[in-house]
């Protein structure tokens, strides 16, 4: 990279920090992408002339709104809703909604920024966006969640549409929440517009394999990385953080392919079961009863639960962070590598801190960053949109095959791009560069809009 480009990118980054004060996760996501882009600006000087990076770092539209609702005790509650429409050069804004008390603008902007490149990598016609609220669905009754979702959609609906902006789930937003959101959208607009939301239930326009897609996709990506290294997944000891939608289906696919998954977690702590996790029990506890993972150990005496413990200290061959951003630090990465971990695939968005990423890259292990490894969820959302548009419903095997093919394609794109730009095996550069070039070329073609 030339010194001039280095300085230009550093200046661009400092502008982003100045224009978006306090949004540390957004700064982190931007910095990580910019660090890959020096050689791209040398190869494509027109991206600099068209100020593509400056434009990408400024979302097309940012919507912030009040969400008032009434709890079961009759008390009025006020939350804040967000939708950040990052970029629509490749298609309608697409990306999930996160309901979690930690949500603020900086989290939604980082997620939307990552989403843009991830969506580009899938090769499907979808732009980037993200939304959510600081509402916490945990511990709320179905009625409270419904009233919140109805209030949220009463503002958001005017910004959505199957050709405009298509939300889906993320942390705290699953089929239940998507159902209430879709019901309110339908009621307000008087349109059964299935393609306006993805992650719907199978009885009302949802796609088979969407629920499984992010976790399965992360394992397909992992498997592709292992194939390059001629290492089989079967027999490997694996750990997975989280025990939500992504974690559960990552565990399922790891087990199907012969991996031995010995630990998973939630925000309270982790459970360690040396015999291998009982996934049916985890599904029952988490998907059906909405309980804490600590209860796993009350059902299986052989397992032990560690409150507030550090999951990454468990020795493993393969680690899949599937909970949340910055859950795996530089120190954790060092511990993992020291204990023999040779492959990491990120089901979550930006789960590894920049220090952690550096440790993995330096150690030369197979490291698949979230925007590549977890793209199977949004890719299958795009398949759901396809089925909705053609009023069709594909079977599970067909859809899973498509997902597997898409993940193979993403892996190949990242692998080849990393090589082309002089950093073979570096999937961080591969993903950032391949995703960016696709968006940038479309933006140049569409003119200054
Ligand atoms: P869920 O809400 O289903 O599950 C989230 C899991 O992560 C829970 O086990 C939760 O524990 C844990 N978690 C959440 N926040 C924290 C925190 N601050 N500290 C520790 N643990 C935490 O969400 P998903 O499984 O859908 O999402 C998980 C990750 O995957 C997120 O990063 C999301 O952005 C990403 N992702 C999701 C996709 C999807 O299709 N759903 C697609 C691509 C990426 P607890 O219940 O205790 O809060
Ligand atoms: O981070 C993600 O890719 C998601 N939460 C899924 C987005 C989607 O539109 O399916």
Image (cartoon, grey):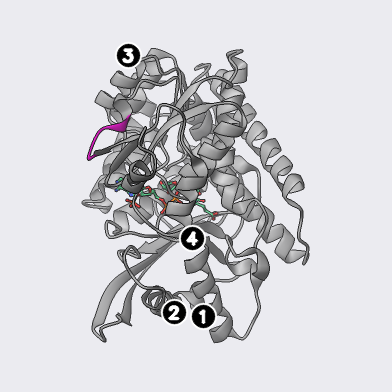
Towards the viewer: 80 or 109: 80
Q: Secondary structure at mark 1?
A: helix
The range drawn in magenta is: 307-311
Earlier along the polypeptide chain: callout 2 or callout 4?
2
- Residue identified by numbered label 2: 150
Q: Is residue 207 left or right of residue 150?
A: right
Earlier along the polypeptide chain: callout 2 or callout 3?
2
Residue at 54% across, 59% down? 93
Q: Secondary structure at mark 2?
A: helix
- Residue identified by numbered label 1: 184
Towards the viewer: 160 or 246: 246
- Residue identified by numbered label 4: 174
Residue 96 visible in the displayed image: yes
Q: Nearer the viewer, mark 2 or mark 4?
A: 4
Say whether mark 4 is within 8 Å of ligand 1.
yes
Residue 219 figure quarter: top right
Residue 35 is situated, as x and y percent measured from the top left of the image, at: 38, 30
Residue 196 figure quarter: bottom right
Q: State how far apart marks 4 and 3 are (Cα).
A: 36 Å
């Amino acid at each position: 990279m030339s010194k001039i480009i280095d300085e230009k990118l550093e200046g661009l980054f400092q502008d982003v920090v100045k224009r978006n004060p306090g949004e540390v996760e957004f700064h982190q996501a931007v910095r990580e992408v910019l660090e890959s882009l020096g050689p791209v600006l040398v190869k494509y000087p027109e991206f600099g002339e068209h100020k593509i990076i400056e434009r990408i770092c400024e979302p097309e539209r940012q919507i912030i709104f009040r969400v008032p609702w009434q709890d079961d005790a009759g008390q009025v509650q006020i939350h804040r809703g967000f939708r950040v429409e990052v970029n629509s050069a490749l298609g309608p804004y697409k990306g999930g909604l996160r309901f979690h008390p930690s949500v603020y603008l900086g989290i939604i902007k980082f997620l939307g920024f990552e989403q843009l490149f991830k969506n580009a990598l899938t090769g499907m016609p979808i732009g980037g966006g993200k939304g959510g609220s600081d509402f916490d669905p945990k511990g709320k009754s179905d009625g409270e969640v419904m009233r919140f979702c109805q209030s949220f959609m009463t503002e958001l609906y005017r910004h959505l549409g199957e050709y405009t902006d298509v939300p889906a789930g993320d942390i705290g937003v699953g089929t239940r929440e998507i159902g209430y959101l879709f019901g309110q959208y339908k009621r307000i607009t008087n349109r059964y517009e299935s393609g306006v939301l993805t992650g719907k239930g199978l009885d009302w326009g949802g796609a088979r394999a969407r629920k499984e897609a992010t976790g399965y996709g992360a394992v397909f990506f992992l498997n592709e990385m292992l194939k390059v290294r001629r290492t089989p997944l079967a027999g490997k000891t694996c750990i997975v953080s989280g025990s939500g939608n992504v974690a559960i289906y990552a565990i399922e696919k790891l087990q199907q392919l012969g991996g031995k998954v010995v630990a998973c977690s939630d925000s309270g702590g982790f459970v360690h079961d040396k015999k291998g996790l009982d996934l049916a029990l985890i599904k029952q506890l988490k998907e059906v009863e909405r309980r804490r993972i600590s209860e796993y150990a009350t059902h299986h005496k052989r397992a032990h639960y560690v409150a507030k413990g550090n999951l990454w200290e468990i020795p493993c061959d393969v680690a899949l962070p599937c909970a949340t951003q910055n859950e795996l630090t530089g120190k954790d990465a060092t511990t993992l590598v020291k204990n023999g971990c040779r492959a990491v695939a990120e089901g979550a968005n930006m789960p590894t801190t920049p220090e952690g990423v550096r440790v993995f890259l330096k150690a030369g292990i197979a490291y698949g960053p979230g925007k590549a490894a977890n793209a199977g969820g949004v890719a299958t959302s795009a398949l759901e949109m396809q089925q909705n548009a053609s009023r069709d419903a594909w079977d599970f095997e067909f859809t899973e095959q498509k997902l597997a093919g898409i993940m193979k394609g993403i892996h190949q794109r990242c692998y080849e791009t990393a090589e082309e730009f002089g950093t073979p095996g570096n999937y961080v550069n591969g993903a950032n560069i391949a995703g960016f070039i696709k968006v940038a070329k479309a933006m140049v073609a569409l003119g200054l809009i």
